[in-house]
Image: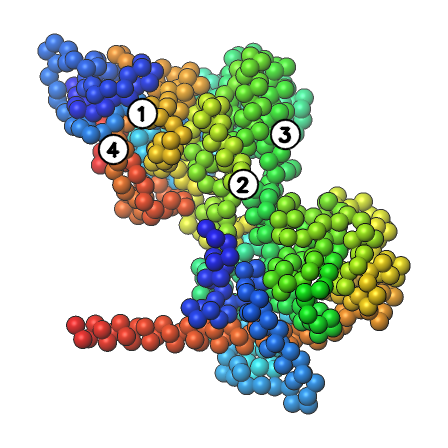
Amino acid sequence: MNTVIQGGRLIDPANDIDAQLDLYLQQGKVLAVGEAPDGFVADRTIDAGGQIVCPGLIDLQAFLREPGQTQKGTIASESGAAAAGGVTTLCCPPQTQPVLDTPAVARLIQDRAAEAGLVQVLPLGALTKGLEGEQLANMMALKAAGCVGFSNVGAGVASAQTLLRCLEYAATHDLLVFVRPQEPSLSSGCAHDGAMAMRLGLEGIPAVAETLEVSRYLLLAEQAGARLHFGQLSCERSIKMIEEARERGQAVSCDLAVHQLLLDDGALEGFDGRYHLSPPLRSEAERAGLRAALVRGGISALCSDHQPHEASAKAAPFSVTEPGMIGLQTLLPLGLQLVEQDLLQLSELVTLLSVEPARILGLDRGQLGVGASADICIFDPEQAWQLDSQTNVSVGTNTPFWEQQLQGQVSHTLLAGELVYSR
Amino acid sequence: MNPVTDSLQLQLNEQGQLRHFLTTEGLSCELLTDILNTADSFVDMGAQSVKKVPLLRGKTVINLFFENSTRTRSTFELAAKRLSADVLNLDIATSATSKGETLRDTLWNLEAMHSDMFVVRHPNSGAAHFIAQHVTPNVAIINAGDGRHAHPTQAMLDMLTIRRHKGAFEPLKVAIVGDILHSRVARSQIHALNTLGADEVRLIAPKTLLPTDVDSLGVKVYSDLGEGLKDVDVVIMLRLQLERMQSAFLPSQGEFYKLYGLSRERLALANPGAIVMHPGPINRGVEIESEVADGAQSLILKQVGYGVATRMAVMSMAVSGQQTQAQAQSQENNQAQADEGNR
């Protein structure tokens, strides 16, 4: 099918484009930018007048909950949320039931995702068998089954020697290791260890639970020569250590969940379980530090850290609610708040949401040059809307942004030229 | 978001009267004084031969204890009975992993029995807030202790003890000694003492038993007991849970007693006439020497008696606050219906 996207403002930072240009698509790829190729007859015309046209968003962390926890979400349901949020590629962590440490589970996830056909799902494999931190997972078999990286998620690898071997093995085969840094013995709490947790009587998770694990991974990876990507950070100190490592020449990148730049632990007043997140919302000062790091370019990418839950998981006293919030459909509007607040240019936001994640994953995506896969997000940055039972696609409704006014709504999402979402 | 207005909105009705009692934080000096004055009147009543008043006649109070407590529960029960309420005691053993769904269902079932008040003790911080906000907002909730967060009736009975034995709060230096980290009592006391205008609140504990950023509550922190007790008028000892040794908060009971136990010698460093309090149950020889616990300066047993009076005060005030709110709402509804009719 031939498609033309007309009249939009094309933002394609990888090709240094920010201009009103039409896009011509054929057979799932970009055929031309700007001028119609000779003899091009459009079967479908998408009017993008007044809207932004950019590469489909690439989310480095979204929990799909399948297999194992389908009461919270399924690959089909959460793929729908991704498409509605303009996300065309996402990475799902290996914390499934059973754990994603076998090719069978990796294939199951990709098969289900292909059936839904709404978003490209790239699984992360377990770094150790069962995420137990003891034996290496079959990383090369998992890579052959489609895993784009390996992670022990928040489970931790207690033995430094085992972790060093994991990293050496990953380095041998040039595999990317994802780290969600949380030292388990310091992470039994449910809120940032500070004045708010103290007043509310909540057990704290100190910043050092994260920074300690960041430093441990950095030093061991330096020794092993492994590539690292730190995900969903919550402390400025972590980013500073990563920046220093990068200056030393270490191959390391990092992302933040976008809500960490907009919320802090002041929101926990009143014990609202929707603010129970992992890593926790940190102090206002810490949030200011994260925003400063964003501005100076210390952060490689933004992700949603989408974690859908069934309603009862959040209907309890704060500390016994399950952590996490949904984020696929709010990733872009929350990112646009950062633009609104003058922390980023629009094209920088697109870079953080698509160009950089593609580069981290080594994908030929996140750009709309001729020949690129036609993964496209079209959105109106001014359009006001709210996430509610009418607009929400996820199984989960667990977000503090529920029924709040949001600005910036996706109108069309194309995956390899196919229209997978339109409003 | 303003923390103070947030908890006020939940605890007070539109007329500014107490309708739930969840925390001492954010309540005005006037309101806390009101509680103390009301409690005072009930203390005197307890000494009379007829101890009952009909303030809660026909009301149903349910004591809902998700954590064991003989002492607190029995004083709440006695308080409700002296107010002529019907009382039901439910001890619901619960594990740390039990889900909120159970808690919600339990409460909805009890609400369906037309209860007027739940007295709730729960191991999770924020449980009483959760119930008042999301489960049964029209039933008066009295927090009888939630996790590490708050134990407001204990704090108010301590304030009553201080006021009856020391008079005004303004000149007083108060020291709270021991396991502050895990103590809901300490948090509620600190808020109450600061609101009532105490001159100084000191916390005395090793770092392992102090929460992060505790100085943001407007307290002075000491790690040396002798130094912290100097010039103090009130010494509040906290109970040390013996399982703290296992989780590496402390090396041993012996070392804790040596450094933070209240002995006669240590007490002599405080102001002459300083009073000694403890929320109970006490560990003799762990946080307090027997001779001090039983000594002339100790008010530990008095506190128990004041507990009944204080609980009577907040229970009667909260039921009345709920009634006023319900009346105001039904008037509003009638008015709205009348407006509808006129249209």
Q: Tell me which label, 1 or 3, sits earlier in the chain.
A: 1
The Cα atoms of the two marked residues, 1 and 2, are separated by: 32 Å
Q: Residue at label 2?
A: A283
Task: Tell me the amino acid under the disc marked 4.
Answer: Asp
Residue B151 visible in the displayed image? no
Q: Amino acid at mark 1?
A: Gly
Residue situated furthest right in the rendering: B265
Amino acid at dot 3: Leu
Labelled disc at residue A212 = 3
**Residue B25 in the figure: left or right of residue A75:** right
SS category of the residue bearing label 3: helix
Q: Position of residue B314 (x, y in %)?
A: 57, 73
- Chain identity of mark 3: A
- Give the residue pinned by disc 1: A56
Disc 2, SS: loop
* Mark-to-mark CA distance, 1 and 4: 14 Å
Do pointers 1 and 3 mark residues of a single chain? yes
Q: Earlier in the sequence, mark 1 or mark 4?
A: 1
- First reached walking from the N terminus: tag 1 or tag 2: 1
Numbered disc 4: what chain?
A
The crowd level at tag 2 (other Cα within 10 Å; few <14, some 14-19, many 20+) is: many
Residue A159's place in the image compared with B318, above or below, is above
- Residue tagged 4: A380
Is disc 1 surrounded by few (<14), some (14 to 19) or many (20+) residues within 10 Å? many
The answer to whether residue A108 is above or below residue B282 is: above
Question: In this image, A372 relative to B140: left or right?
Answer: left
In the image, are marks 4 and 3 on the same chain?
yes
- On the image, the x and y values in percent for residue B85 come to 55, 80
- The span from disc 4 to disc 3 (Cα, nearest Å) is 41 Å
Pointer 2 indicates a residue of which chain?
Answer: A
Instruction: Point out the tag, 4 or 3, that comes first from the N-terminus.
Output: 3
